[in-house]
Image (cartoon, rainbow, N blue to C red):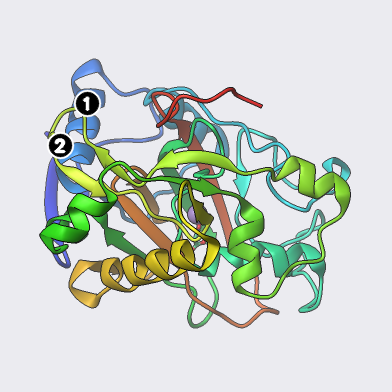
């Protein structure tokens, strides 16, 4: 069956059919996925009955896997999944939901702020591939905002002002926004800020987009209050309803998004219900600004 993509929501998301993710894809099929990602930015594979190994195999065909090491507050001995997966669930090693005041949970729910994955790394994420193993009885949607559309609708003088801005991103900046500030010395070192362009241009479509994320907390050359106010204005602009697609999860859904072109956020759900979400991540093409990797 040929690959077929049907548009969803406001036009930058699509439901993709015609691929069997349980088996290796052909070269043509891999090209079709990349082309679909360039065109849509978010692609949904509905109700996939695939194993973790099959998700990983599919992901590896799209690029190099980013390993989830040192990016959460789970200790290596607490990990439920291998480092080829980012554990986006609310579950501990034994598959039990974290207590509501568990520090690991309070850090992890920072993903309810709009963000782009791994914008706090020198080489940020290209694609994220999220598979829903179990979903709560209510809530827990994921929302996506399209950054090329948001950029296009900025006023010209703002575009001129921000075109060459460089931001600093850290998971500490996003957590500060929700009042989570009790980081240990080790965590402060591990979460040291990295620099990212505020405006990026897509190498194939050549469209410019806002590269925003709640991890951004400073802008080189601006005072802290000016930077924070500008980032807040841009965030308000970029997350207007007209730029947003809401994904309501069914068990088995697998969603891929381009982090360069979108922001996303999780929505709340009952904390004592399991929400088992497993993410594979493809590394980006390189740093967005020249800097020494730490
Ligand atoms: C992620 C993420 C949101 C969600 O997987 O990177 O932010 O709804 N997920 O779980
Ligand atoms: Mn995320």
Q: Quadrant of the C terminus?
A: top right
Ligand 1 closer than 8 Å to label 1 CB:
no
Quadrant in which residue 144 is drawn: bottom left
Residue pictured at 65% horizontal, 77% vertical: 273
- Residue 133 location (% of width, % of height): 54, 57
Secondary structure, mark 1, is helix
Instruction: Specify the label residue 3 is tagged with.
Output: 2
| Mark carried by residue 189 | none
Instruction: Kindly identify the residue that appears in the image at 48 percent across and 36 percent down.
Output: 124
Mark 1, residue position: 29
Residue 119 appears in view: yes
Position of residue 204 in the picture relative to residue 220 (left or right): left
User: Does mark 2 have its CB less than 8 Å from ligand 1?
Assistant: no
Neighbours of disc 1 within 10 Å: few (<14), some (14-19), many (20+): some
Q: CA distance from mark 2 to mark 1?
A: 7 Å
Question: Judging from the image, what secondary structure is the residue with disc 2 in?
Answer: loop
Q: Nearer the viewer, residue 25 or 147?
A: 147
Which of marks 1 and 2 precedes in the sequence? 2
Q: From the viewer's perspective, is residue 214 above or below residue 207?
A: below
Q: Compare residues 37 and 52 and report the one nearer the observer.
A: 37
Position of residue 175 in the picture relative to residue 156 (left or right)? right
| Residue that protrudes farthest toward the top in the picture | 27
Relative to 124, say whether 60 is above or below. Answer: above
Labelled pair 2, 1 in contact (Cβ < 8 Å): yes
Residue 147 image position (x, y, % from top left): 25, 55
Mark 2, other Cα within 10 Å: few <14 / some 14–19 / many ≥20? few
The image shows residue 67 at horizontal and vertical percentages of 62, 32
Between 94 and 111, the one lying in front of the other is 111
Q: Position of residue 255 (x, y in %)?
A: 37, 51
The residue sitting at 21% across, 28% down in the picture is 203
């Amino acid at each position: 069956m040929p690959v077929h993509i049907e548009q969803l929501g406001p036009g930058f998301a699509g439901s993709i059919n015609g691929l069997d993710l349980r088996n290796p894809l052909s070269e043509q099929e891999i090209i079709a996925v990349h082309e679909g990602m360039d065109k849509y930015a978010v692609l949904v594979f509905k109700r996939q009955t695939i194993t973790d190994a099959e998700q990983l195999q599919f992901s590896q065909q799209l690029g190099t896997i980013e390993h989830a090491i040192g990016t959460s507050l789970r200790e290596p001995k607490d990990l439920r999944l291998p480092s080829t997966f980012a554990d986006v669930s609310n579950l501990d090693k034994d598959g039990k939901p974290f207590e509501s005041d568990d520090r690991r949970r309070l850090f992890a729910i920072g993903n309810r702020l709009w963000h782009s994955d791994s914008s706090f790394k020198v080489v940020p994420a290209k694609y994220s591939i999220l598979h829903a193993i179990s979903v709560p009885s209510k809530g827990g949607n994921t929302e996506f905002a399209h950054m090329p559309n948001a950029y296009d609708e900025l006023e010209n003088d703002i575009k001129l002002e921000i075109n060459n801005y460089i931001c600093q991103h850290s998971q500490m900046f996003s957590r500060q926004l929700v009042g989570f500030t009790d980081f240990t010395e080790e965590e402060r070192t591990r979460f040291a800020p990295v620099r990212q362009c505020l405006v990026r241009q897509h190498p194939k479509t050549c469209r410019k987009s806002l590269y925003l994320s709640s991890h951004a907390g400073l802008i080189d050359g601006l005072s802290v209050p000016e930077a924070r106010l500008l980032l807040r204005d841009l965030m308000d602009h970029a997350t207007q309803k007209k730029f947003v697609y809401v994904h309501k999860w069914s068990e088995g859904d697998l969603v891929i998004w381009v982090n360069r072109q979108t922001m996303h956020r999780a929505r709340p759900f009952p904390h004592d219900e399991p929400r088992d979400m497993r993410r594979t991540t493809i590394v980006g093409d390189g740093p967005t600004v020249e800097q020494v990797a730490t």
